[in-house]
Amino acid sequence: MIAGGGLAGHRIAFALQHEADVTLIDPKNFFEVPMAVPRMLVEPDRAREAVIPFADFLPKVALIRGSFQSFRPGFVRTDSGEVPFDYLVIATGAGYSGELIKASGGTAGERSSGLREWAERIRLANHVLIVGGGPVGVEVAGEILEDLPGKRLTLAHRGDALLPGLTPGPQRYALELLRKRGAEVRLGTDVLCEADVVLWCTGSSGGAGRIAVDAHLRVSGAENVFAVGDVTSLPEPKMGLWAGKHAAVVIQNLRRLVRGVSVKAVYHPATDSKTMLVTLGRRHGTGHLPFGDFTNSWFARQVKSRDMFIGRYRKGVGL
Ligand SMILES: Cc1cc2nc3c(=O)[nH]c(=O)nc-3n(C[C@H](O)[C@H](O)[C@H](O)COP(=O)(O)OP(=O)(O)OC[C@H]3O[C@@H](n4cnc5c(N)ncnc54)[C@H](O)[C@@H]3O)c2cc1C
């Protein structure tokens, strides 16, 4: 039983669907590549590839459209009753500041048309206000400035520097590039201005980091229950990069348990990691990797800016 088919959960369901009876419960009927959201706000057609119905890649998985609520030994409680399980993975992620950036329910069709409507509103607006200068706000700004040159765009950020958690070099680079392209970037402010469209990019809301896990990513005190991704209280930045690695560890451990041997794979949290790759439109980007800071556009383009990881995630589920 997997609760949540997001970045970590969809991967576990895909990997195990031919080896075990897998059930996935999620209030949505699709997986969305989260990294593609900023691009879809200017190019909503990309939703055809980035918003992927579970049924397209999980043919062997029993899909329940609903919400996981809690568990007791052998059973999960959902909004439509109890469902039995042998092993449970909790992968319900963290909420986000708004439905636009992260849908909390609905179908792939509804999500795609919602993104199309927002893209149209952004295209028609005289003045767009982005609230929040973390990676999502900066990437959304980068997309709009590149695709809709001349649009009045204000980015309001509460902190003194964009991209909190990143190193100073890329923080400055992003600020300078956005300003050079015409954005009005206001730092250290809670004061918002009038705009035709307001895009809330203020990050995770409630829920992040609730569940304590052991080194094998089992929920403390429950031998047959795992938790992965943003819902865990692991001391590391809440990122898809790490959620994917959690998934890989749990896939290995579940394979062993299904074979009747005990868990072995261990996860080492990326505590203090500054790793981040932030796009600034289709051709630019900046960030920090284990080898250091980079502002190399060629590199950013090759790795992320060109397709925002859509191809990588589709390939990961055989599409
Ligand atoms: C716009 C955007 C861009 C991002 N870009 C990057 C990036 O470039 N690099 C990076 O490393 N990270 C990035 N992230 C962060 C990354 O997306 C998250 O860290 C990652 O998705 C966490 O994975 P997860 O599986 O824990 O949760 P999620 O991917 O959020 O998935 C949670 C799933 O659980 C479902 N769910 C929620 N509640 C319930 C419930 N009660 N019952 C059942 N199902 C439920 C949800 O519908 C969802 O499908 C980005 C995030 C956003 C929003």
Image (spheres, grey):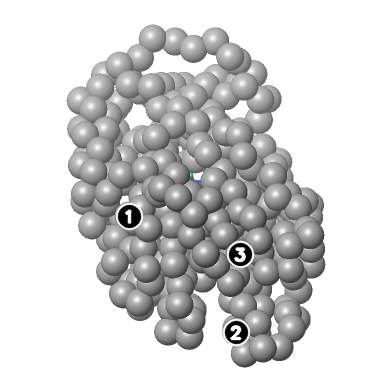
- Is residue 285 shown above or below 41? below
Quarter location, residue 86: bottom right
Mark 2 is surrounded, within 10 Å at the Cα level, by few (under 14), some (14 to 19) or many (20 or more) other residues, namely few
Quarter location, residue 197: top left
- Percent position of residue 268, x then y: 77, 66
Residue nearer the viewer, 190 or 83:
83
Res 74 label: 3
- Is residue 155 shown above or below 274? above
- Which residue is pictured at 45% across the width and 77% down the height? 21
Query: Quarter of the image containing the C terminus?
Result: bottom left
Q: Sequence order check: which comes first, mark 2 or mark 1?
A: 1
- Which residue is pictured at 42% across the width and 53% down the height? 26
Cβ atoms at labels 2 and 3 below 8 Å apart: no
Q: Amino acid at mark 3?
A: Gly
**Left or right of 159, for residue 92:** left
Q: Amino acid at mark 1?
A: Asn
Q: Sequence order check: which comes first, mark 3 or mark 1?
A: 1
